[in-house]
Image (cartoon, rainbow, N blue to C red):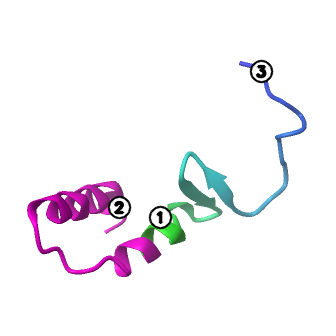
């Protein structure tokens, strides 16, 4: 594995990594994903329910 020094940041308290928010407390949910979930309209057809289910699955480890 090789690291690109231009992309590496050391000594930070929190940051995004593979879509997750890493902090001193551990792995937390991405605030942008939570905001999108809250703003999602009430599902009214099969496709919207599948979308809601997918979003819940991605955030299930934090619930």
Residue 1: horizontal and vertical position, in percent? 71, 18
Residue 62, quarter of picture: bottom left
Q: CA distance from mark 1 to mark 2?
A: 7 Å
Residue at the disc numbered 3: 2
First of labels 1, 2 by sequence position: 1
Residue 18: horizontal and vertical position, in percent? 56, 45
Residue 31's place in the image compared with 60, above or below, is: below
Q: Which mark is residue 53?
A: none
Query: Which residue is found at the position 83% from the left and 41% from the top?
Result: 8
Graded by Cα atoms within 10 Å as few (under 14), some (14 to 19) or many (20 or more), the crowding at tag 3 reads few
Q: CA distance from mark 1 to mark 3?
A: 27 Å
Q: Main secondary structure of the magenta part?
A: helix
Q: Which mark is residue 29?
A: 1
Q: Is 53 left or right of 38, judged from the image as shown?
A: left
- For the residues labelled 1 and 2, say whether their Cβ atoms are less than 8 Å apart: yes
First of labels 2, 3 by sequence position: 3
Q: CA distance from mark 2 to mark 3?
A: 30 Å
* The C terminus - image quarter: bottom left
> Residue pushed farthest top?
1
Q: Secondary structure at mark 1?
A: loop
Residue 21, quarter of picture: bottom right
Q: Which mark is residue 59?
A: 2
Which segment did they paint magenta? Answer: 35-63
Residue 35: horizontal and vertical position, in percent? 45, 76
Query: Which residue is found at the position 16% from the left and 59% from the top?
Result: 47
First of labels 1, 3 by sequence position: 3
Q: Secondary structure at mark 3?
A: loop
């Amino acid at each position: 594995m090789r690291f690109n020094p231009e992309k590496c940041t050391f000594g930070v308290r929190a940051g995004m990594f593979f879509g997750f928010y890493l902090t001193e407390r551990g792995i937390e949910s991405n605030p942008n994903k939570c905001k999108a979930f809250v703003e999602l309209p009430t599902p009214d057809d099969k496709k919207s329910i599948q979308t809601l289910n997918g979003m819940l699955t991605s955030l299930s480890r934090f619930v």
